[in-house]
Amino acid sequence: MNLWLILSINSVTLGGLLFLLSAGFSLIFGLMRIPNLTHGSMFMLGAYFGVTLIGWGFGFWLAALMAGLGVALFGGIVERFVLRRLVGNELAQVLVTLGLSFMVADVCLMQWGGDPISVDTPAGLVGSSKVFGMAFPTYRLAIIFIAVAIAAALWGMLDRTRLGAMIRAAVDDPAMARVVGIRVSHLFTFVFCLGAGLAGFAGVIGGPILSVYPGLDQDMLPLALVVVILGGSGSLLGSLVGSFVVGLLYNFGQAMFPELAYVVLFLPMLIVLVLRPRGLFGRAAP
Amino acid sequence: MNRAALAIALLLLATLPFWIGNSFYVNVATQMLIYAIFALGLNVLVGYAGLVTLGHAALFGVAAYAGATLINSGHGHIIVAIGACLATLAVAAIFAVLALRGTGLGFVMITVALGQIAWGIAYRWISLTNGDNGVSINARPAPFGLSLESAPALYWATLVVFLVAVVAMAIFVASPFGASLRGARDQPRRMTALGYNVWLIRFLAFLFSGFWSGVAGLLYLYYNQFVSPQTVALSASAEALLMVIAGGTGTLLGPIAGAILVIVMKDIASAYIERWNFVLGAIFVLIVVFMPEGLVPGVVRLCRRVIAARRPRAPMPVLGEESGE
């Protein structure tokens, strides 16, 4: 198989993982105006939870789901007991989430040590499978499939259900939404847990590709930031497109200019910021 | 009264190596001064411009890396200083143009991304920065023939730069430009209506802030004789921001007190536990949740309250006034 095809597949896979990570970041940032700098930590925490659960003998997918739920619970605690005290004070939220991310990183280092931990590819998805006469790594195809399925589910939830309508209403005008009887504070907690859970889940299923190591959070956070700056905050479509763009740039950048991968990543962000500061699909600032 | 206190403080600072003696503590004092300069520079943006940045360690690091590269290619101290400052100003200008596309949260996010990119370059662009191994210099340069090799010598050199920085900040705060910067922070629309170019004011403030961060970065290189990607990491930016916020934003003394506090805590914490980052994060959370205005204004408020309680005829000031439109 030629290099370009491998690179493309890797890019799309990374894009899928980034979507799972940045969809939550984008929703939380766009809907609740909370700049959640712990999001990279959620990803890493999920991955470490997954490692432990797999070590206890749970199957890969069950471990991924449970890790996602565990991280969602952690996110809920953070939102209810810390961020809730700082509503409307965005600067304080930035600082608190940053402080929490340092604490999470250090706790992970204490608990799981400093060595990278590799996660085995789940049995049944090892090896490659033939699509259109070409061999693709099965596990990467599975990640892409999961990402697309979750994207579709999220879109359906936000656009087609009563819950989604309530979330959109709460975003556009929280005060009016409260007046008509929507429990806005519960919705925000739900969205925060959802975002955290997705990030944790992505951490586990990204494990076989990225492995788990201290600093994973600091590696993923800027990628999620670039995705949201590119795609525009609060836009699901923006996160999807942004993720795949970042996935492509990151992989091709690393292959072609290994020393400048971050610069290559940064160029489209620069262009978008100069031409369209609210992001490709972002809504105009109110 | 104030003048006497200032004179005593200056005297104590100038004679510090004599009464402290141990060169370890002199070095700690040097570190405090270096980070105080950094925090003073950062405070221009965070305190006076109201623009919170998490990418300032990049500017600090650029100066250190540029200085190290220039020293290692055999240049003299004047070229090194000028080159490091110019490099910092150039990077600060790029950062400012990009980050000022956003305000508030957008600004913070962009500075985080820019800072991480700078870290990525320091870490990955091995031919330029030697990657994870960092760049070291063999000896401190000797500006104007004065050797900086001993701890007190470096301390005094840093002290001179520090005093220049403090005076520069005092002049800046009192200047019309400082006033227009605070105006741009509190009432950007009114400032625009009055004919001020808010963007340009913020841009210049970013350069001014970046310049002092660069000066601190160069001094850090002289002190440490080594610079690594850790200098540019997000946690370094966060540490500097903690100094400013812990001490109290928008005050002259605050960042200095914050720098001293953070360095002391860091040295104490690292003597007992390895987990400085955990402590850093915990302090962040505690200060933000319980003492949002910072330690210096917090203590000042507490003192005023005690004095007011002793003389109950003075009316209590209204706390937490908002300046919204």
Image (spheres, coloured by chain):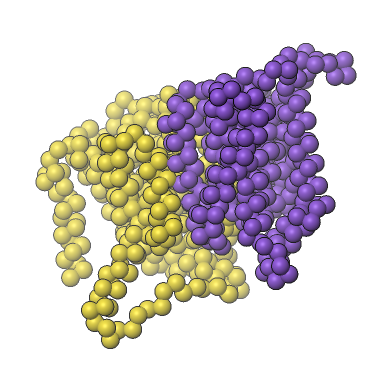
Chain colours: A purple, B yellow
Residue occupying the point 28% across, 54% down: B163
Farthest residue to the bottom: give it. B313
Farthest residue to the front: give it. A57
* Residue A229 position in % (x across, y down): 66, 46
Q: Nearer the viewer, residue B247 or B134?
A: B247
Relative to A245, B51 lies left or right: left
Q: Nearer the viewer, residue B92 or A204?
A: A204
- In which quadrant is the C terminus of chain A drawn? bottom right
- In which quadrant is the N terminus of chain A drawn? top right
For the question of whether residue B121 can be seen, the reply is no
Residue A241 to residue A7: above or below: below
For the question of whether residue B4 can be seen, the reply is yes
* Residue B105 position in % (x across, y down): 58, 55
Q: Nearer the viewer, residue B299 or A284?
A: B299
Farthest residue to the right: give it. A132
* Residue B118 position in % (x across, y down): 52, 37
Residue occupying the point 69% across, 38% down: A20
Q: Nearer the viewer, residue A260 or A167?
A: A167
Displayed quadrant of residue A130 = top right
* Residue A6 position in % (x across, y down): 74, 19
Relative to A110, A134 lies left or right: right
Residue occupying the point 76% across, 54% down: A164
Q: How many marks?
A: 0
Relative to B215, A235 lies left or right: right
Residue A160 to residue A215: above or below: below
Residue occupying the point 19% across, 56% down: B10
